Amino acid sequence: MCSFGYIFFFALFSDKVLLMEIIRASVMGFCFGVRRAVELAEKALAENPGKKVYSLGPLIHNENALQSLAEKGLHILEEAEIESLEEGRVVIIRAHGVAPKVTEALEAKKCVVIDATCPRVKASQKMVERYTHQNDYVVLTGDRNHGEVIGIAGYAGENFSQIQDYAEAEKFTIPCDDEKNIILLSQTTYSPVEFERIEHLFRNRFKNIAVMNTICPATNERQLALSELCKKVEGVLVIGGKNSANTKRLFQTAESLCAHVAHIQGSDDIPTEFFDLKSVGITAGASTPDDIIAAVEEKLKK
């Protein structure tokens, strides 16, 4: 974790000198799991010159980073295409992970499988697999359409349910014996505030409950850093892919705390109004590369 970075520069307008302050959030950008996935992909590309290297689905949720990897030779493989894939191909499991049946399909094709699943996601997969095959009942909070949640659900036995938000939690009933132990856990990038509300609801409703807070600390750290950042600036630029769950939540938090907020993917997307502000804060989702953050900063300075 680094301290706030401050950058000042002057702009001349007629006879006036305006000072713009650019402040980076103390925690932002690549998390450990995403950085690891990108490094594994770059290593695979370097070790397999002239060969086709695939990622199963988008490796991470950042369009600019994916374009850079594509230029180096990384191809995106959809699950539906596995059956027609030539044997022996190099395939990278993305940071979000996949269900066991997907890995088995790749192995049946004699693929060289490189598992870039985030270690925290892997831990959630193992917990769901273990608890749902015991006399316990697992409830997973998260976006049911998100790759991570789909992959984790693939490890579950019959004693499993998935809920999207507090509204669904209010209507939820355990479809089994009330004496079962209930295990509550979440998608790693789930909203800490929403998870706390659901936890409180479940603790009041069910007598045998264990809560596994599987939200990645990096998610909470970025939210806290953003809250501090919003106190210091007139506007905030949230940098990240449009499909990135944690970037969307950063944007939602910033909107609630700051007057001028924009979710951008790169320096070309900076709204004109931000160049007129006296202070601009920068934060970025966990899938946003360092060079994209630097480019946004440079664009503001110019």
Image (cartoon, rainbow, N blue to C red):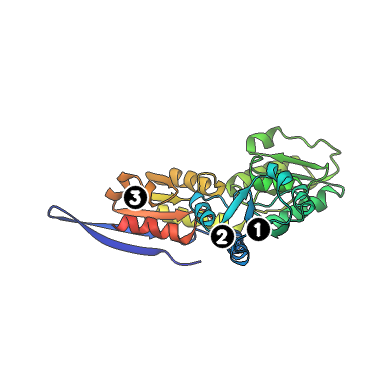
The residue that appears at 73% across and 57% down in the rendered structure is: 88
Furthest-top residue in view? 171
Estimate the spatial distance between the alpha carbons at disc 2 and disc 1, rounded to whole Å.
10 Å
Q: Is residue 280 left or right of residue 265?
A: left
Mark earlier in primary sequence (3, 2): 2
Q: Is residue 9 left or right of residue 177?
A: left
Q: Are marks 2 and 1 in contact (CB under 8 Å)?
A: yes
Q: Nearer the viewer, residue 112 or 28?
A: 112
Circle 2 crowding by C-alpha within 10 Å: few under 14, some 14–19, many from 20: many
- Residue that mark 1 sits on: 118
- Residue that mark 2 sits on: 31
Helix or strand or loop: what does disc 3 sit on?
Answer: loop
Please name the amino acid that badge 1 sits on: Cys
Q: Which part of the image, by quadrant, shows the C terminus?
A: bottom left
Of discs 3 and 1, which sits in the foreground? 1
Q: Nearer the viewer, residue 118 or 19?
A: 118
Please name the amino acid that badge 2 sits on: Cys
Q: Are marks 3 and 1 in contact (CB under 8 Å)?
A: no
